[in-house]
Amino acid sequence: MKSNNAIKTPVIKIIFYLAFFFMPTLALAETGDGDEKEHEEGHIELTQEQIKHAGISLSRVGAGNIRETLPVYGVITSNAEQIQSVSARFDGVIRSVNKKIGDQARKGETLVTVEANESLKTYSVVSSLNGVITQRHANIGEQTADKVLFVVEDFSTVWVDLSLFPKDVAKAQVGQTVRIKNTNNAITGEGQIIYIAPLGNSNNQVTIARVLISNTDNLWKPGLFVNAEITLSETAAPLVIHNEAVQRVEGENVVFVQGEEGFEPRPVTLGRTDGESSEVLAGLNVDETYVSKNSFVLKSEMGKEDAEHGH
């Protein structure tokens, strides 16, 4: 006759195996509905800190203009109207020099002092504008003669000389708006055509169109090449978004829209585009908030969620 302990042992093993196999299933059943619902809704929740850390920018859907543009190339040059060549009023001996190349100069600030040859009186030579010393030809003890002592340049504005080929010259006009981008598109600016050269260059067959742009941050360096787009015309559209907002998901154009439950990937139908903005024909409503910059972060996050649910 078997002992009670011998009978209890197989029973205990059976209970253990049942618990081991069925408890994970029960746990999944309890939480599965919520996960599936979140996945079906497709919302991605991010905190304000995460949004800031990811460099995500938000914009509102609204009316805008789609531009017809002419792409051209150009080079940054100094604004010749904001350059001062500093000379002495009277011939004499330079007694002091207060500036070197690269120094800032303020309007009215003394650059050098000169002892006049005739009167032997010392007078100051000052800057007539705010700018940077780009050339210096003055040293203590030298005669001023008629030479240029300093060149001061104000870089708060610069010119962009655009190259127009013969087929494009007729399209450009004074007053047209021009968007400027550096060669890697990291810096952008905007200005207007202020001058079109009356003569072309026989060496390279181009005509110069000059644009004036602001340079208060000193980001545009004379001598550097840039890309540019001359705005030829603009057409109004009721719904316009930034092109950077659009991501391709499963063969569809998608924009991430912000709602109360997070960011929702919304399929959109696009119309006309100009390389910067696109017209929205369907999928978005006016005043909805969407991700206009770094939307690829949300696309990546959505891919992670799909992978997790797939497992």
Image (cartoon, rainbow, N blue to C red):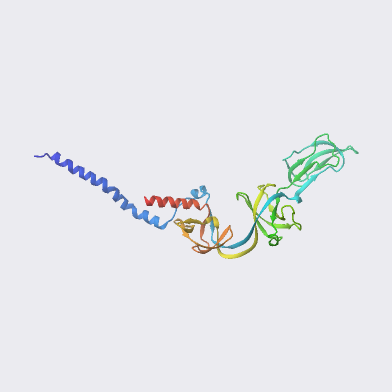
* Nearest to the observer: residue 150 or residue 172: 172
Res. 92 in view: yes
For residue 200, above or below residue 145: below
Residue 266: x and y, percent?
47, 59
Q: Residue at x 57, y 59 (%)?
A: 277
Which quadrant would the N terminus be assigned to in this image? top left
Where is 21 relative to 268, above or below? above
Q: Residue at x 61, y 61 (%)?
A: 67
Along the horizontal axis of the image, is 278 left or right of 8?
right
User: Residue 46, how many percent across, how many down?
Assistant: 46, 51
| Residue farthest along the right direction in this orientation | 118
Give the percent coordinates (x, y) of residue 98. Answer: 77, 38
**Figure label count:** 0
Depth check, front residue: 159 or 250: 250
Quarter of the view holding residue 102? top right
Q: Residue furthest front?
A: 203
Q: Position of residue 223 (x, y in %)?
A: 69, 47
Report whether 238 appears left or right of 81: left
Most distant residue in the left direction: 1
* Residue 128 shows in this picture: no
* Residue at position x 20%, y 45% in the image: 14
Q: Residue at x 39, y 57 (%)?
A: 40
